[in-house]
Image: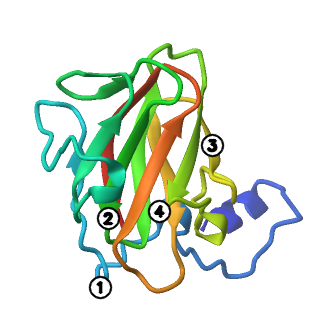
Amino acid sequence: MIQQLLAEAGHADIDRSVVSIEPQGAEAAADWRTLQSPETYVGRALAERFTSHEPASLRLNQWTLVGDWTQHDESALANRSGSRIAYRFHARDVHLIMGSAAHEKSVRFRVLIDGQSPGAAHGLDVDGAGNGTISGPRMYQLIRQSGPIADRLIEIEFLDPGAEVYDFTFG
C-alpha cells in the first residue's frame, strides 16, 4: 500500500519486493521453552529474591548488589564506580532497564557471564568484551545466547557512578 502511494506521488525508484518482517534483537519473542527466570524489580518497593550473598553463591533467580548503592522505591542507584549487580538466571536473553541519574551524562558498564566476557552471547547493547554505555533511560539487551540454555550468572559492573537500575527482564 505504501509503495503504491509513493509511486503515485511520483517516486520512481520504489522497491516493490515483498519484505519479511521478523522481530530481531530485543524485539524478538521470548524463548518460552527455556525461560525459567521472572521479571525482577530492583527497587525496594517491589523487589523479590534479593539476597546479600556473594554473587558466586547465588541460587537460581536470586540477585544481589555489591559496592556502594542506594535503594529507592523503584530503582537502585550505583553511587560509586565499581558497583555491581549480579543475578543467577535461566533464560536465553537478559535485559536490564536502566538509565543515568544525571540524565545528560552517560555511564559505562561491563557485563560478565559466569565470570567471563560474553563473546558471541553478547546482546545488542554490549560488545563481545561485555562493554556498554547507558545513553538514556531504556531497556538494554545484555545477553542473547544461542547455545544450550542453563543456569548462568550475570554480573554488571558500572565503571562510572550514577547508574540507575530498575528491572531485569528475560526472554
Q: What amino acid is at disc 4? A: Glu
Q: What amino acid is at disc 1? A: Arg
First of labels 1, 3 by sequence position = 1
Relative placement, left or right, of 94 versus 123 is: left
Q: What amino acid is at disc 2? A: Phe
SS of the residue under disc 3: strand
Residue 105 sits in quarter: top right
First of labels 1, 2 by sequence position = 1
Q: Callout 1: few (<14), some (14-19), or many (20+) C-alpha neighbours within 10 Å?
A: few
Q: Do the residues labelled 2 and 4 touch (CB within 8 Å)?
A: no
* Residue that badge 2 annotates: 89
Q: Are marks 3 and 2 in contact (CB under 8 Å)?
A: no
First of labels 3, 4 by sequence position = 4
First of labels 3, 2 by sequence position = 2
* Residue that badge 1 annotates: 33
Mark 2 and mark 4: Cα distance apart in space: 20 Å
125 in relation to 74, above or below: below
SS of the residue under disc 2: strand
* Residue that badge 4 annotates: 27
Mark 3 and mark 2: Cα distance apart in space: 20 Å
Relative placement, left or right, of 35 versus 99 is: left
Relative placement, left or right, of 20 versus 80 is: right
Along the viewing direction, whichever of 66 and 10 lies nearer the viewer: 66
* Residue that badge 3 annotates: 132
Front disc: 4 or 1: 1
Give the residue displayed 54% in from the left and 80% down from the top: 146
148 in relation to 29, above or below: below
Residue 87 sits in quarter: bottom left
Residue 32 sits in quarter: bottom left
